[in-house]
Image (tube, grey):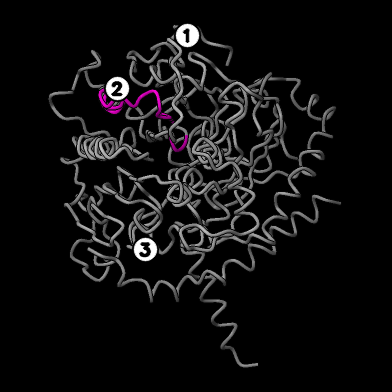
Amino acid sequence: MSHDVKDKADAKANPIESGRRPLLRGLLAVALVATSLSPFVRSPAVAQQPSTAKPNILVIFGDDIGQSNISAYTRGVVGYKTPNIDRIANEGMMFTDYYAENSCTAGRSTFITGQVCLRTGLCKVGIPGAPVGLQDRDVTIAQALKPLGYATGQFGKNHLGDRDEYLPTKHGFDEFFGNLYHLNAEEEPERPYYPKNDTTFTKSNSPRGVLKASADGKIEDTGPLNRKRMETVDDETTAAAIDFMQRQARANKPFFTWMNTTRMHAFTHVRASMQGQSGMPGNDYADGMIEHDGDVGKLLKTLDELGIANNTIVVYTTDNGPNQWSWPDAATTPFRSEKDTNWEGAFRVPAMVRWPGRIKAGDVSNEMISGLDWFPTLLAAAGDTDIKDRLLKGTSLNSKSAKVHLDGYNQLPLLTGQGKSARNDFYYLNDDGEVVAYRYGDFKIVFCEQRKPGGFEVWANPFTCLRAPKVFNLRMDPFERADVVSDQYYDWLAKNAYLIQYGTWRVAPFLQTFKDYPPSQRSASFSIDQMVEGLMKTLDKTAPK
């Protein structure tokens, strides 16, 4: 079912420009004020000779998975191991200080566009029928790779808007097969209180099915992603990704494949034949993780069988940190708190990359790196080393004018052992598009904190913005516990308060970039605040003078 019928009405209710102007004024005001884990043991892998052909690119996203759920990080402390995911780390580089975003849509949008979610407006988790989605002006990795001769395919979860114009095939991908939302939203029509008899609502707000789309405009709805289909949908999308890679390999064409599994987002529905495979009866999460690792194994096996593993960059990571409100059906992390907060547990996720002959096998990096960095890094690996500068000045991609501010850095020198990370800071944005924290070097400045310790309350309760920000040394205190457990924390903070001033001063140039590169749209809201704001603006315009 196409949702194009909603466009005109929603555009009036949520105009981009009306939300952009006050947002920019707030950013520039802040800018004005501002201006006045140890190395792991690795089994050695045989070095392979690099190919001179353009590398294939396979990026695999899990969903809501924590570092502790990958045995390369914690050696199976959770009761199971992930040998296929571990293989990527053993044969490549693994990161301890890798930053995604704090929720689903933001983590995916920042990867594919290379821009912080405040620029694209894709900070809030996308829900069925929402007017917000990936805008035409925001360039994707797929669009940038097309002029270099790449075939592009996206499979599995998208979560960047559910209207036809937001689909991946409208933004540089030749093919797409997958779902459009977070997993628990897909099963809402099966819930007892769902207003299925209110057709006025359901026509424009029900989740679309699993879609098969192509760049020529064809869209096929293959049916809903109900709870039963959730047991096996990753089989479908993994098979589609494999078929795509096989076809491109036969055609001798370099490919970019972005595979997004539904595992391990809540809620986990495991088929009967896989229940109990972890050896821990009733632990559906563990059973699902083993299944997820198996799907990664299928993808790696395909590269081996096609004889292209040596010339394929493989990235494994996830969109955000674990949610824990659904425990025991939930991931885990050593870092503080969970998804949708300002704490490390929301942002610091597992990540690893393999490129035989180019990236040293068994390496572990403690350097800072972000999901934002893959855009310029993968383009550099494909031969385009100045994409960031060209987009900043304005360029043409496939006859399309493009001018955007990439917030990522080319990390190819880090990956290939030729240098250190190009990134020395990171901005923590919440799903309202607010800068709630900032890391530079070892230090993290927390401007606004989520004070609820966890659970669904972190989604329901507001952030508390601090008159005096907190500071953490993420080498001395990587799990951000000092303000809770140390009797000396505030004495230490008082003696080092200059770090707050320095951090705030460093944030100013970033905020000022929004003057020349304004947001594409305003981030969405779960509540009615934006509707009320729009109504009040309309009333102001029509009120008698």
- Disc 1 residue type? Arg
Question: Which label lies toward us, 1 or 2?
Answer: 2
Determine which of the numbered discs, if any, sits on residue 304 in the image.
2
Residue found at the far bottom of this picture: 544
Residue at image x 56%, y 49%?
Answer: 115
Asked which secondary structure carries label 3, the reply is: helix
The residue wearing badge 1 is: 42
- Disc 2 residue type? Asp
Q: Position of residue 232 (x, y in %)?
A: 18, 35
* 3 and 2 marks in contact (CB < 8 Å): no
- Give the CA separation, mark 3 to mark 2: 36 Å
Q: Nearer the viewer, residue 357 or 262?
A: 357
Q: Position of residue 328 (x, y in %)?
A: 33, 27
Measured along the vertical axis of the image, is residue 2 above or below residue 267?
below
Measured along the vertical axis of the image, is residue 113 above or below residue 418?
below
Magenta residues, as a range? 296-320
Q: Nearer the viewer, residue 448 or 230?
A: 230
Measured along the vertical axis of the image, is residue 500 above or below residue 435?
above
- Was residue 300 drawn as part of the magenta stretch in this picture? yes
